[in-house]
Amino acid sequence: MADVAVGKDKCGEQRLVSLPLSRIRVIMKSSPEVSSINQEALVLTAKATELFVQYLATYSYRHGSGKERKALTYSDLANTAEESETFQFLADILPKKILASKYLKMLKEKREDEEANDGDKSDNDEAES
Amino acid sequence: MAERPEDLNLPNAVITRIIKEALPDGVNISKEARSAISRAASVFVLYATSCANNFAMKGKRKTLNASDVLSAMEEMEFQRFITPLKEALEAYRREQKGKKEASEQKKKDKDRKTDSEEQDRSRDEDNDEDEERLEEEEQNEEEEVDN
């Protein structure tokens, strides 16, 4: 399945998509309900993913903090995932980072709350993975 | 089907290139940021696939097709992708059509060649074209195998 479509083809023209179709296909097939994928759908998904990467990168860069923007950082991306509705589906995999000391403090406060309430409390753990 | 974790990732080199081409010159990307975007891209594929699959199921089809993917983009609020995707689809279809015609032409040429082998100049040209078509045909086969 060597159909990596990278860079220029034999005629020297730009390829339609750069991402390897075989890899995209593996990811798509890992979705449980999917039976089969037509070749056009595969090409479009690959292309859409490239557009997505471009969009995520430029959006995060533009909305990042500071005026002298020399770099795109993880926190730019995490901020985007949290603040933009379009990119909200990424919130779980791009959690914001906090200082360890702050996190431990949060845990401690939470534990104290639970003890005070003295009952069943099903909290959603907001710990980052 | 058991996938190894690395199979669900996209190649770093390609992802990095796409990011660099999108951002202004001279802007760096931290390794962490690049890795995060790569993960995000994989999640995007899953999300898009799941969404497209819903459209296929609505249409009582088992095979995802191009329109399912386009509908998914609309649903996911990535309308901005729809026009470039449609253009890519047209280009892809033209390319496929060209390949098909080329391989049919090659077959005709092959038949013609076995009949007469005295035209040296045109034979040279044919050889060049055949080589190109042969490569394209091999590529075509590879793509079809992927189906």
Image (cartoon, rainbow, N blue to C red):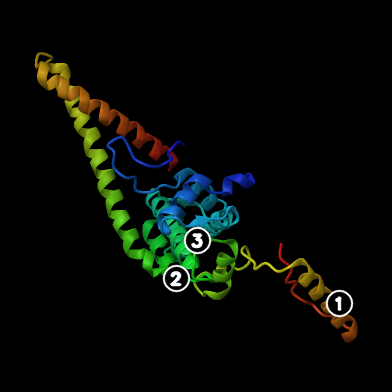
Q: Position of residue B137 (x, y in %)?
A: 31, 32
Give the spatial CA distance, label 1 vs label 2. 41 Å
Q: Which mark is residue B75?
A: 2
For mark 2, give the secondary structure.
Answer: helix
Q: Chain of mark 3?
A: A
Give the spatial CA distance, label 2 vs label 3. 34 Å
Label 1 sits on residue: A111
Quick one: B44 or B146, which is closer to the camera?
B44
Give the spatial CA distance, label 1 vs label 3. 41 Å
Q: Which mark is residue A70?
A: 3
**Residue at x 25% of width, y 33% of height:** B103
Q: Are marks 1 and 2 in contact (CB under 8 Å)?
A: no
For mark 3, give the secondary structure.
Answer: loop
Against A26, residue B130 (above or below) is above
* Between marks 1 and 3 in the image, the one whose residue lies nearer the viewer: 3
Q: Is residue B61 visible?
A: no
Q: In this rendering, would A15 be left or right of B45?
A: left
For marks 1 and 3 on the same chain, the one whose residue lies earlier in the sequence: 3
